[in-house]
Amino acid sequence: MSLTVDGVKYVVDCGYNIPKVYNSLDILKGLLKLELKSAGANWDTIRQCICSAYSHQAARVKSLGEYNNLRTGMPCHLHPTSVLYGMEYTPHYIVYHELVFTSKEYMQCVTAVDPKWLAEMGPMFFSLREAGASRKKHADLHQAKMEAEFQLAQEEAAARAATERLRAQSRSASRSQIVTPGGVNSMPRFKTPRRCTNL
């Protein structure tokens, strides 16, 4: 069995020298026992599937028809035969299937995607930055959070020390005193009677 590179369109089985051609839907239904569901008019589902397959080949818009690869920074251009080439709206992020080098690097089989999908489908390559949060603002928020945690830890330590002092005082008040023989606070001494030597 061999699969085409562009997707599962047809599979050719060359067993017993009799070539058989299977449609990909027959394979999904019968051989692989997978249930088929239609996306209907929801094209975002299909675009998300394409994004998950080609998330490593993503580009961001630089100018009209020109993009930069997100991983390498290499400039790429939309191929003139692409549907996105003649549109008035240029998508900010795209994924592509292949690069063709003529006078420029041209991307073919291009699909517009959402940047959140790139971060979700390819977390090893991409991540999202919080909108409007500069590094300074983020550092200030982190510093304030750390100071608040430090203040809380100090208050908890002071409260623990106070309770420990109270426990120590209550233990010392309830203890009985140790009596040492011949000591200042010792009990009255009884003298041992003398022996009579006159007998």
Image (cartoon, rainbow, N blue to C red):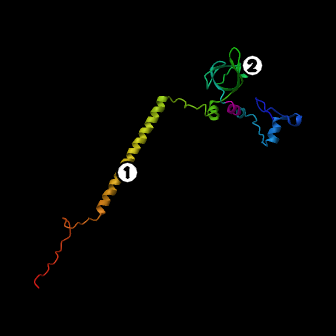
The residues tagged by marks 1 and 2 sit, at their Cα atoms, a distance apart of 74 Å
Q: Main secondary structure of the magenta part?
A: helix
Residue that extends furthest to the right in the rendered view of this protein: 18
Label 1 amino acid?
A: Arg
Q: Where does the N terminus fall, quadrant-wise?
A: top right
Under mark 2, the amino acid is: Thr
| Left or right position of 173 against 30 | left
Give the number of marks: 2
Residue 55 got which mark?
A: none
Q: Nearer the viewer, residue 168 or 113?
A: 168
Instruction: Please tell me in which quadrant of the rendered image residue 182 appears.
Output: bottom left
Mark 1 crowd level (few <14, some 14–19, many ≥20, 10 Å Cα) = few
The magenta region covers 47-54
Q: Specify whether residue 193 is painted magenta.
A: no
Q: What residue is shown at x 43% (from left), y 42% (from top)?
A: 149
* Residue at screen point 32% across, 57% down: 168
Residue lying at the far top of the rendered structure: 103
- Viewer-side residue, 187 vs 169: 187
Say whether marks 1 and 2 touch (CB < 8 Å): no
Nearest the eye: 180 or 185: 180
Q: Which residue is mark 2?
A: 81
The residue that mark 1 highlights is: 160
**In this rendering, is residue 81 above or below 148?**
above
Percent x, y of residue 191? 16, 75
Q: Is residue 158 left or right of residue 182?
A: right
Secondary structure type for disc 1: helix
Q: Position of residue 178 (x, y in %)?
A: 26, 65
Residue occupying the far bottom of the picture? 199
Report the quarter where the C terminus lies.
bottom left
